[in-house]
Image (cartoon, rainbow, N blue to C red):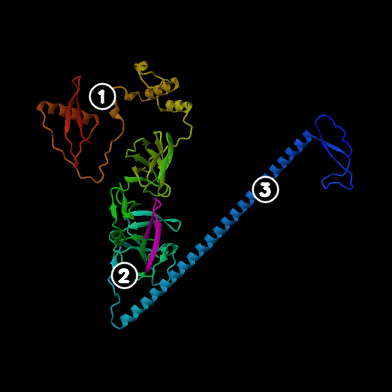
Amino acid sequence: MQPVASAGEGAVPVGVSDTGEGASSTDVEGPAMTMNGGDVMKTSVAAVRLARRQARRQRKRDGAKRAQARKKAATREQEQQRLDCDELVRRRQADADEALRELEDRRQRRTEARGVNEPAQPLEPVRVSLVQRASRGTEEVTSNDDDATYVEADDGLPTATMGVSGVQRTVKLDIGARYTVAGTNWVAYGDRVSCTAPVDFVEGIGGLLLDVVGVWRFVMMNVFGETVTVDACIIKGCEDEFLIGVDFMRSHEAVMDFRENELRYRENERLVVIPFRTFEGPTSGRIAAVRVARKTHLTSRSVTPIEVAVVAKNGEKGVFVPTTRLGSVMLAATVTEVQDGKVWIPAINGSDGRVKLPSKKNLGTWVPLDEDVTVLEVNGELDHTKLRRWLDVLGDADTPLDDEDDVQIGVEDDGSRQLMIRLLRVFRGLMVNTSACPPATKVQIEHHVDTGNAAPVMLKRRRQAQTEDAVIESNVKTMLASGVIEEGNGAWGFPVVLVRKKDGECCLRRSI
């Protein structure tokens, strides 16, 4: 063994032996070598970094493989769903074709039975609200088509929107129909039930007789996400109509509430609500209940948009009016548009904790807007410059008002105060008494009290002195002459109460 030469301070000695007898297998051949401690640390750090890079790359490769596997699984699932849907459509069409062949066989047997003097209708037909209509221009009716009769439901029936097989369809509630019936186009949305139809015929308005093809079962979903299962008789000659009859309402003990426009029943200890709308009369559907579409949690001290169910058609604009107190949750009147029987409204939670709004919670009413009402959208263009230009067009906004400095606006911003002052200048006619009545009553506005379906009320006249009768008569004549009130001859009547103020002036009050 030769001595190792010193390589300086910090050098690590490494022994090296020549080959030969007594040499260890772990010895390194070659001359004596030295390795600095700093080089060893650098080598170890580089190895660690390399291992980390390799681990990150491996994780990325594994993540890419998992994403690719999920994508392939989703593609296979979509393809399987498409195949299942196609198979379902083929099966339902085969059931419909088989039912129609059975109907033809029954017709043939009835024809043969009439030849031997047997009755052609073994069962008495039941009545439904169906009327005959002319065929559409796109429908081809051949001369040998025995079923060239097209019928539809009578107008004015309560109508609900339900989801079935992924599409939105309308169904009508007919309390005059003994059984639930549907048109032939509905066979694509349900499954045939292996049971005998309760009747062979249904009779529409005017004695129209329609054959019953069979019984189909439909799984529907209302706007609250609840499942509603309905068995219906498919009738030949009707296409798109679906009438829910008394058999469904009786079996579910359902209640039709025309005040709230809802059909309600209990199933498995839970309340099922089916909103509907009506079409008869000028005020039909003016007042409808608004309920929470699904359970919603409101975070503390925040404004959260919530989805509510509304009985209205798509694209209809209306005003949501809150009528229910919800404690710390505040709701505001909102103008919004209906989509698939639902609208969004803001809810403000003023408490420090979360608040839960349960599904089907009644929040208020919905009032649709008339076509002549224009809804202005907030688009950020309402700035001071455009407001001043608009006020200049309306009228004289430069001539000061009397005692203008004493006007209390309620704002400290000079710009906002000047805008309000200019607005008051334009409508200065509302601030000056020019007749026997206050100026605010001279605006061209008519007040209307919606009494709904309530019966007229006629209250008894209050007893008062003859001198007070003279004061009332004088005030009534003055208001009639000024056009504030007009004479009415309706069945409603409320007595007038004479109230004398502190300054000696008398005013008339009455209940509305």
Quadrant of the frame with the N terminus: top right
Q: Are marks 1 and 3 in contact (CB under 8 Å)?
A: no
Please name whichever residue, 376 or 4, is drawn nearer the observer in this view of the structure: 4
Q: Secondary structure at mark 2?
A: loop
Identify the amino acid type marked 1.
Ser
Q: Is residue 332 part of the magenta span, yes or no?
A: no
Residue count near mark 2 (Cα–Cα under 10 Å), binned few <14, some 14–19, many ≥20: some
| Type of amino acid under label 2 | Val
Give x and y (percent) for residue 279: 32, 51
The residue at which mark 3 appears reads as 58
x then y, percent, for residue 83: 53, 63
* Residue under pointer 2: 199
| Quadrant holding the C terminus | top left
Tell me the element at label 3.
helix
In the image, the segment drawn in magenta is: 214-229
What main secondary structure does the magenta stretch of the protein show? strand
**Cα distance in 3D space between marks 1 and 3:** 90 Å
Q: How far, Cα to Cα, is label 2 from label 1?
A: 75 Å
Report the front residue among 251 and 401: 251
Q: Which residue is mark 1?
A: 435
Question: Is 129 on the left-hand or right-hand side of 18?
Answer: left
Identify the residue at image location x=87%, y=47%: 22
Q: Which of the two marks, 2 or 3, is nearer to us in this view?
A: 3
User: Which callout, 1 or 3, points at the residue further toward the start of the chain?
Assistant: 3
Q: Amino acid at mark 3?
A: Gln
